[in-house]
Image: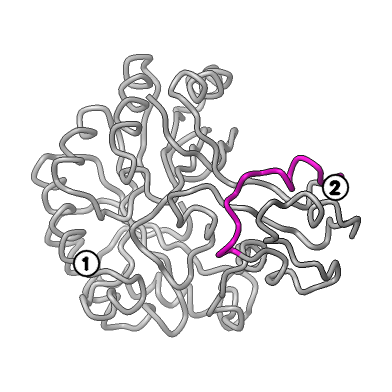
Amino acid sequence: MKGIITHIQRYSIHDGPGIRTVVFFKGCPLTCLWCCNPETQSFKPELEFIKSLCQHCGQCVKICPENAVNTDLFCPESEKIDRQKCTVCSKCVSVCPSTALKIIGEEMDTEAVLAVIKKDGAFYRRSGGGITLSGGEPLSQPKFAQHLLKKCHDLNIHTAVETCGLASQNVFEQVLLFTGLFLFDIKHLDPQNHQRLTGVSNELILSNLRWLHEKSAHVILRLPLVPGLNMDTENLHSLAELVDELGIEEVNLIPFHQMGKDKYSHLGKNYQLSGQIDLRLDEEGKKNLLSAQEFLKSEKVNVTIGG
């Protein structure tokens, strides 16, 4: 069984309890404006160019069979690769002396991923940790996700899935037995705003959340907080109502940050929120973040910042 992976992060203390290994799947059905992992949006491998590493040697220009590399060795980062011409053949990567060019997205089989996961088995046992499938959207590669979860479940390794919730109910049925925890992202409670901010409606997402509740799955809700987009009192109140309806025991607020900003230009993509404040670093942003937490607490929600 094979899947497309962008990265495997060992010794993570986020995305679930204890010390974890996080496996980032490539591909996502949502296009959230604030996405900090744009390299996981496409389901296909992509070519990344980091200008700060470039030695301007021109080897990539000479070897590209599609003439997809800009002949101007000092062009802006986002203009380095003609993405319409590029076939991601990796020939330019093979001759780059400085790793300025890199292919994002690697096909891996279950055993190769498991080999990485098993290295930290002692840490899982001592800390109550395990693995977390993230992305992207891991349930967009359902058979690979299910196979990997089952393998870990059979090895008594705790499993978690970080999901946007957009998959068929059948997919959730396939992974439910082997998933100890669902980290379920709620982007916005209003269907129209959800469509505007992520490119899709939240109808199926909320339906799947209610189905998981009916099946007594362990679910932690996660709300990425983005100033001006979903931090308003109306949306927070709607979240509190949903939590009360389903008896959700824990909500994590994920503060908007700019850690993924540079990734967009590396991939030749446009980033619309470059001027937005970082809630973790901006003083006014910190106050707004705490205000959102206090509001939810006043609505009887067990809420923490981060998770």
Nearer to the camera, 215 or 105 = 105
Rendering coords of residue 123 (x, y %): 55, 23
The crowd level at tag 1 (other Cα within 10 Å; few <14, some 14-19, many 20+) is many
Rendering coords of residue 6 (x, y %): 54, 43
Q: Tell me what residue is drawn at x 55 percent, y 37 percent.
A: 106
Nearer to the camera, 248 or 76 = 76
From what the image shows, is residue 274 above or below residue 59? below
Nearer to the camera, 214 or 304 = 214
The residue under label 1 is 202
Judged by its main secondary structure, the magenta piece is: loop
The crowd level at tag 2 (other Cα within 10 Å; few <14, some 14-19, many 20+) is some
In the displayed structure image, the side of residue 5 where residue 240 appears, left or right: left
Q: How many marks?
A: 2
- The local secondary structure at tag 1 comes to loop
Q: Residue 98 got which mark? A: 2
Looking at the rendered structure, the kind of residue marked 2 is Ser
As for residue 241 lying within the magenta part, the answer is no
Q: Tell me what residue is drawn at x 23 percent, y 68 percent.
A: 240
Residue bounds of the magenta highlight = 83-98
Q: CA distance from mark 1 to mark 2?
A: 43 Å
- Mark nearest the camera among 1 and 2 is 2
Rendering coords of residue 175 (x, y %): 24, 33
- Residue 158's image quarter? top left
Give the farthest residue toward the left. 214
In the displayed structure image, the side of residue 73 where residue 197 appears, left or right: left
From what the image shows, is residue 254 above or below residue 191? above
Q: Tell me what residue is drawn at x 21 percent, y 59 percent.
A: 205
Whether residues under marks 1 and 2 lie with C-beta atoms below 8 angstroms apart, the answer is no
Nearer to the camera, 257 or 3 = 3
Q: Quadrant for the N terminus, please.
A: top left
Q: Residue 128 got which mark? A: none
Looking at the rendered structure, the kind of residue marked 1 is Asn
